[in-house]
Amino acid sequence: MTIDRPIDQDTLYRMREIIRIRLTMEGRTIEVACAEARGFGGARHPNALAEIEAAITSILQDLGALEPAPPTASGKDGVTMVAVEWSALTEALSYAMRFDERGKRRSTASEFMAAMAAGEMTRRIEATGFVLMRRPRQVEDVPWKYDVPGVSNRVK
């Protein structure tokens, strides 16, 4: 019978050193370093797997290797908003310059110039420190090619 006890300081120190050395000196990925630390901690404390996961998360935060969660906000209708990826903004701006509100190609825009202008606008917006938010896509947000009941003609 194994007695459940909290993770001792020696185990935490060794797990931290495993992760630090694997990341900095050996150039391994975070997944590999965490798997090795998880295996070490699990061997010493087999009944404390949740505590080991929490310890690994804490170690990664201390080392600055864990990316913070993307910022979220609540929209006017209560929908949780997420941060916009800059590449998605570039694609949306480029599309807006090439097509009108009905999806019909504009005769004045060219592919190359629209992509260049959208990329430059995105770089300027990003450089000024703006954070753009959008609501997550829903299944009903997907455009339909034809509005025929019972026929699934989604645009891919």
Image (cartoon, grey):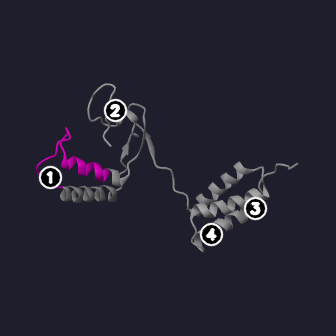
Q: Mark 4 falls on what kind of element?
A: helix
> Upstream in the sequence, badge 1 or badge 4?
4
Q: Label 3: which residue?
A: 11
> Upstream in the sequence, badge 4 or badge 2?
4
The residue drawn where x is 45% and y is 43% is: 72
> Which image quadrant is residue 15 in?
bottom right
Q: Label 2: which residue?
A: 152
- Tell me where residue 36 appears, x and y as whole percent: 67, 63
Q: Are marks 1 and 3 in contact (CB under 8 Å)?
A: no
The residue drawn where x is 25% and y is 50% is: 93
Image quarter (top left, top right, bottom left or bottom right) of the C terminus = top left
Amino acid type for the residue under numbered disc 4: Arg
Magenta residues? 89-110
Residue 153 lies, with reference to residue 122, above or below; the image says above
> Which image quadrant is residue 142 in?
top left
Amino acid type for the residue under numbered disc 3: Thr
Q: Label 4: which residue?
A: 22
> Upstream in the sequence, badge 1 or badge 3?
3
CA neighbours of label 4 inside 10 A, class few (<14), some (14 to 19), many (20+) = some
- Tell me where residue 89 appears, x and y as whole percent: 31, 50
Q: Mark 3 falls on what kind of element?
A: helix
Amino acid type for the residue under numbered disc 2: Ser
